[in-house]
Image (spheres, rainbow, N blue to C red):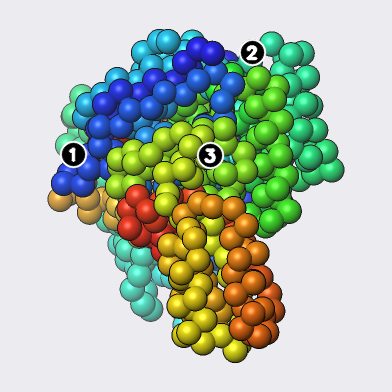
Amino acid sequence: MFLHNFKFELLSGLRVKEMIIWLILFPIALGTCFKVAFSSVYENTMVFEPIKVAVVTEEKTLDSEMFKETISQVKNEKDKLFKVKLCDRKKALKLLDDEEISAVIFAGNDISMTTASSGMSVTVAKAFLDQYIHSRDIIINAMKSGDTQAYESVMKAVSDDTQSVVKKQMTHGNTDMYIQYFYNLLAMVAMYGSLSGLHIAIGSQANLSALGARKNISPTPKLIQITASLCATFVMEAVCIVIAVTYTRFVLRIDYGDRLGLVYLAAVIGGCLGVSLGFMVGSIGKMSLGAKSAMCSAVSLGLCFFSGLMDGGMKAKVELAAPWFNRINPAALISDSIYCLNVYEDLSRFWEKIVSMVVITVILTLLGFVMTRRRRYASV
Amino acid sequence: MGVVVKISGLVKSYKELTAVNELDLEINEGEVFGLLGPNGSGKSTTINCLLSLLDFDKGEIEIFGKKMSPTAYDIKKDIGIIMQDVAVFDELTVYENIDYFCGLYVTDKAQRKKLVDEAVKFSGLEDFVKFRPKKLSGGLLRRLNIACGIAHKPKLIILDEPTVAVDPQSRNKILEGITELNKQGATVIYTSHYMEEVEQICSRIAIIDKGKKIAEGTKEQLKKMVKNTETISILACEAKQEHLEQIRQLPHVLEAELEDKKLVIHYSGGKHNLIRVLDVLQKADVDFGRVYSELPTLNDVFLELTGTALRDQEG
């Protein structure tokens, strides 16, 4: 009985045009739009370019040699901070006038910097220069003191200080803000699964559909019918969300990090959560299918909105105003789980989100069962 | 003949409206039992209570000698239901729909295949097995609805207004099918507000109005309840009041009227009524055209029992 119901529910579900449109084609179209819209913005604003500076050595001193050595080390790091050009004053100032460089650094007994404008690159160059001068002065003072022990302590401290500002790998993967939209896109696909869940509730209630009435009259227990329908819908939703992840990852080349298997897992569990949400909403009251569909769509979109589908900063605003909502908002949980997976080396936060999603799925499904459990109706 | 369905003192109310009021029914094995009444008379409510879909306030319902309940699966497996609204999956083909609903009753695959094939043939849907319901005409859709309800060969078949919005050809096909199912041994409960259908196929009929059973019996028994046994209509353009008076003096005439050049005469029994009235017209040298003689219908029964024509209440 279970397999019979499962087979036909799956078969009919996979043929629903609306499902193909909203759960497969629409996310593909929206994902493609996101990619087109954000890729140019991302390239223009987010990709770090080395800061172009010119270094002018006006007289050859210990300071100037130390500086050139230091800046050349910075230059030689993997993430180039500066693109250094060694030249004379005249040429350097010409480059600055032509806006081919951001700053000119004069290295001699004193080190100074000239800029033509302000901005992030100038700020970074100035910060680097200040840090260098500060460290140099400490070392020189320690050397002048003649105290070998003090000198060694200073060198160690400076060295430690240097360590403290060296880039440390706290995060794991892609943290750019635009990828959040793709996390939320997957959350949206999961939430649209609620429409499929809604149909389970409608199709199993004698007071909501003729199909429900016919099923209720049959000798197959209601529990078996609904469980089979739910399982079939979970499978359908899983198929849709796997398509969405695969398309965004391999066609749009969205970087979900190197734990793709777990991304699929989170997305599939999110899909089940969406289905259970729809099943629960569909089980409430005796509203028409149209009214319940509208309610389900509104709830899904609302949850996606607060998760940041339409405004990338929304989740942060919710976190400040009502952090508890982010803990129970299914769309936020789904996008957060994939975010945690991509960003944190440690998987504990990811599993925390997964457990939350499973618990909410179970609660919503049980509520749906409780509300559809009745076998006789006041009116049909 | 055993009693298949027994309803005793059934009461079902929706707030202040009593939809079914102290209804008693007994339906015997092998019968085609008609439940006739206007829209809103309580027919579908009675069926839904019978099937344990609806809560009811009072009464007892037994099917096959056992108390009916939502979990009486041993009873349900022998019931086939064809609802007023078509209840099929839009995304499944004709064959898949019948297979699905048959599978809710029959687990054995080989047996099910045989039953589904028979149901397809029975309902005349052989050429449409791969069609989806949306591509079927209204009549074919109704036939599919019926095939889904009877594929598992139930002992009791309940049809709740199965011919609503169906063309005459499909309606005849459906009615023939119901008669055939009855011949194969199924007990049938047929609800309708179309008295001609009920008269055509039902062996026993209960007329209900405002939730109450107002009459029950064979169609002959019901028709005997009315005084008007025959109605004769004659198109007579030249007929005058004096001729009408002469006709009223004839034996067994209950009432005679002249309606828009048409004489309408109601009788309460008697033989050769038509000959007598034509004789009156011939002697008075009144030309006449079309002549109709109608025996009483269930509508006349309903009219007599309730004071309202059944047709007046439809829709």
Q: Is residue B277 above or below residue A50?
A: below
Q: Nearer the viewer, mark 3 or mark 2?
A: 3
Chain identity of mark 3: B
What residue sits right under mark 3 in the picture?
B220
Numbered circle sitting on residue A148: none
Does residue A110 appear in the picture of this structure?
A: yes
What residue sits right under mark 1 in the picture?
A324
> In this rendering, would A219 be left or right of A327?
right
SS assignment at label 2: loop
SS assignment at label 1: helix
In percent of the image, x 78 and y 19: which residue is there?
Answer: B114
Give the amino acid type for the residue marked by disc 1 in the picture.
Trp
- Front-lying residue, A174 or B8: B8
What residue sits right under mark 2 in the picture?
B107
Q: Which quadrant of the figure has residue A375?
A: top left
In percent of the image, x 43 and y 62: which residue is there?
Answer: B254
CB atoms at circles 1 and 2 under 8 Å apart?
no
Chain identity of mark 2: B
Q: Farthest residue in the front direction?
A: B283
Residue B241 image position (x, y, % from top left):
46, 85
Give the amino acid type for the residue marked by disc 3 in the picture.
Glu
CB atoms at circles 3 and 1 under 8 Å apart?
no
Q: Is residue B146 above or below residue A345?
A: below
Pointer 1: residues within 10 angstroms few (<14), some, or many (20+)?
A: few
CB atoms at circles 3 and 2 under 8 Å apart?
no
Give the amino acid type for the residue marked by disc 2 in the picture.
Thr
Q: Is residue A69 above or below residue A152?
A: below
